[in-house]
Image: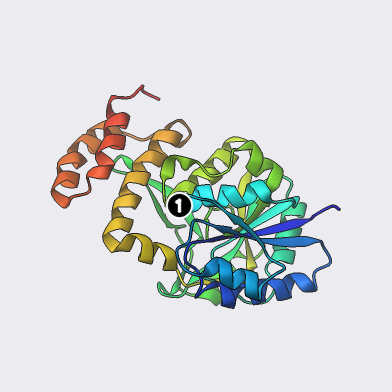
Amino acid sequence: MFMRLSVIIPNYNGERLLPRLLPQILACLSTAPHTSEVIVADDASTDSSIVMLQREFPLVRIVTGAANVGFGSNCNRGASAAKGEYIAFVNSDIVLEGDPFAPLLAALEATPDAFAAMPLVYAAPLKRVENVQEIWISRGLPWLRAIPGMPVEDLSALQSVLAGTANETALCGAFFVCRRDVFTKLGGFSPAFGRAYWEDVDLGCRAKALGMKTIIVPSVLVRHEHSQTMDAVLGDVGKRRRMLCNQAVFLRRNLASLKPVPNYRLYLLLRIPQRIISGDGCAIAPYLSLIFGKRA
């Protein structure tokens, strides 16, 4: 049977979060005019997630792995089992408001050169929309920032500004729907980023290199409790170190498409003592790879 949409929820110790999210997703899909499936990709959880899912959500497919592989590779694990023409990736700490899937699918069908479509993702703890953003090159490194001029702390104003525009943006892994054939062609999320951070932006950049873009559909909104799993897994220090390391990994992988990056070798060399003093040594190896690697 033809499957239109596969919804994939990456999970690690989400026993507390899944009972809130899954009924929302299942309710949306139960009235949808398209065929669908829901897959929970479990990243070797140590809580009772699997037992809870088997008991309370028998219609949900569970894909498991023996090893904890991190966000991107776990998403790939779920995608490898998906049957849908389109894939939706939904973090376990997302809260839905209405049905986000139908309008996102419609937007993708209406935009042949779009790889992925996203709702506005409102990060509740940050009190702002987190996914209307761009890659910004400063002092030798890439950063993510809100697109200039976008009122990301005011939902109504933001929706008004975005209405009727193309709304191309960097990809955010918290919630997006994409074309499965393109995701497969790209090889999914790269395992180079380890547990988490920057693998979603990297995927969007690689799609852009194929001539495909990521779009925002401003009429659709979801709320994000923001980093619930990573807070527990890595803590504040671990998150900072992983972000710094993967920022450099991202630059190394995408340097050619991000050019020009003026004086990046000099800036990275100057940053190394700072990383040593701050204890963020994980960034030094990718810095050195960029400094002494082949010039792009």
In the figure, 33 relative to 139: above or below?
below
Residue 186: give x, y in percent of width and height: 60, 38
Give SS at disc 1: loop
Does the image show residue 149? yes
Where in the figure is residue 62, as x and y percent of width and height? 63, 60
Question: What residue is at 36 percent from the left and 45 percent from the top?
Answer: 247
Apparent side of residue 152 relative to residue 120 in the rendered image (left or right):
left
Residue 189: % across, % down = 53, 44
Give residue 28's position: percent from left, percent from top.
72, 73
User: Callout 1, which amino acid?
Assistant: Asn
How many numbered circles does the render carry?
Answer: 1
Q: Nearer the viewer, residue 47 or 89?
A: 47
Q: Which quadrant of the rendered structure holds the C terminus?
A: top left
> Who is closer to the viewer here, 181 or 10?
10
Q: Which residue is mark 1?
A: 68
Name, please, the residue furthest toward the right: 1
Of residue 27 and residue 105, the one placed in the foreground of this image is 27
Q: Is residue 237 above or below residue 204?
A: below
- Residue shown at 40%/62% (left/top)? 230
Q: Residue at x 76, y 50 (%)?
A: 85
Residue 55, by quadrant, is: bottom right
* Location of residue 292 (image quadrant): top left
> Where is 51 relative to 210, above or below?
below
Side (left or right) of 108 relative to 170:
right
Q: Is residue 263 visible?
A: no
How busy is the neighbourhood of tag 1: few (under 14 within 10 Å), some, or many (20 plus)? some
Q: How is the image coloured?
A: rainbow
Looking at this view, is 121 or 160 the one in front? Answer: 121
